[in-house]
Image (tube, rainbow, N blue to C red):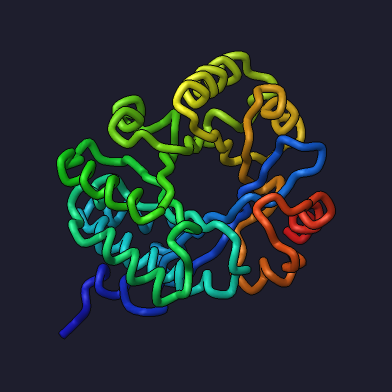
């Protein structure tokens, strides 16, 4: 019997996991804060691109199936990372609202990979207007009770970000690159990010600027008191063993001094 494309996507080994540093930019020298695990679809197919992969999953209403496969691939590869390094993974809001077994599934996966739950944070994506609120809120509560961090991704471009902030009450707001790239020259971007900063300050959340590629934008983010940043200025996404080879791993704390190493990461392409 011929397998469907979804079946081929979720086969073991079909999804590749890569990792990108999330960097604390508050000091004079950037320090490593955590990494985000990212998924790549089957190599040599149109689904290798993560944008295409997850858009395909959304159109087929198979977000829970693909999210589970992607998280499994990421946590399996994350075993190669240092044991105290926090790890972020993406999950659709619709998955949390539909997949009743997701909290227990994450606990089992993390246990199998030897990853403490307090090292994990979920970055919640909202690309659908459908979220079953009762199930969603119950799952968020269960995830928090297990020690898993909750972040809201793509802040600034989602279909209803303020609603999701109110529903989710995240401890981290990840600002989309649309608000970050070119912010040094754009007063409207600066004003919008200041507003996000005010919201975060009022609720005790951390702000992460995604898609950072330019030193000028880094300087502006610091001026706006943004704590964390992620992007090609520091490193492209890399396989776990490649990332470990490029970064000295002992000691490897949340605020490890990274000035030279981050420059080497960027230079490595």
Residue found 31% across the figure and 72% down from its top: 10
Classify residue 39 by image quadrant. bottom left
Where is residue 107 drawn, in percent x and y?
34, 66
Where is residue 126 drawn, in percent x and y?
32, 40
Q: Is residue 44 visible?
A: no
Residue 241 lies left or right of residue 165; in this view the side is right
> From this viewpoint, which residue is outermost toward the bottom?
1
Residue found 36% across the figure and 79% down from its top: 12
Residue 249 lies left or right of residue 21; in this view the side is right
Above or below for 261 versus 125: below
The N terminus: image quadrant: bottom left
> From this viewpoint, which residue is outermost toward the right?
260
> From this viewpoint, which residue is outermost toward the front?
145
Where is residue 50 drawn, in percent x and y?
43, 56
**Image mark count:** 0
Where is residue 223 drawn, in percent x and y?
71, 23
The C terminus: image quadrant: bottom right
> In the image shown, does 180 or 136 lie closer to the viewer?
136
Above or below for 48 versus 185: below
Q: Is residue 32 visible?
A: yes
Above or below for 131 versus 60: above
Above or below for 198 versus 134: above
Residue found 53% across the figure and 74% down from its top: 79
Residue found 52% across the figure and 23% down from its top: 201
């Amino acid at each position: 019997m011929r397998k469907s494309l979804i079946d081929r996507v979720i086969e073991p080994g079909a999804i590749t996991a890569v990792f990108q540093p999330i960097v604390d930019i508050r000091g004079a020298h950037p320090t490593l804060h955590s990494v985000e695990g990212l998924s790549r679809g089957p190599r040599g197919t149109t689904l290798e691109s993560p944008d295409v992969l997850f858009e395909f999953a959304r159109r087929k209403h198979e977000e829970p199936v693909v999210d589970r496969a992607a998280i499994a691939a990421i946590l399996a590869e994350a075993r190669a990372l240092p044991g105290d390094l926090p790890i972020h993974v993406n999950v659709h809001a619709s998955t949390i609202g539909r997949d009743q077994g997701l909290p227990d599934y994450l606990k089992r996966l993390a246990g199998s990979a030897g990853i403490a739950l307090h090292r994990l944070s979920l970055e919640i994506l909202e690309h659908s207007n459908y979220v079953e609120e009762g199930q969603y809120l119950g799952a968020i509560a269960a995830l928090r009770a297990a020690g898993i961090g909750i972040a809201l991704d793509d802040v600034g471009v989602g279909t209803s970000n303020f609603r999701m902030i109110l529903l989710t009450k995240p401890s981290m707001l990840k600002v989309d690159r649309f608000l970050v790239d070119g912010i040094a020259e754009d007063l409207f971007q600066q004003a919008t990010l200041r507003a996000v900063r005010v919201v975060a300050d009022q609720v005790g959340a951390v702000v992460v600027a995604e898609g950072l590629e330019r030193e000028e934008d880094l300087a502006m983010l610091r001026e706006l008191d943004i704590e964390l940043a992620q992007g090609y200025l520091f490193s492209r996404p890399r396989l776990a063993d490649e990332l470990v080879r490029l970064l000295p791993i002992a000691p490897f704390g949340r605020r490890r001094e990274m000035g030279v190493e981050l420059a080497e990461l960027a230079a490595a392409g």
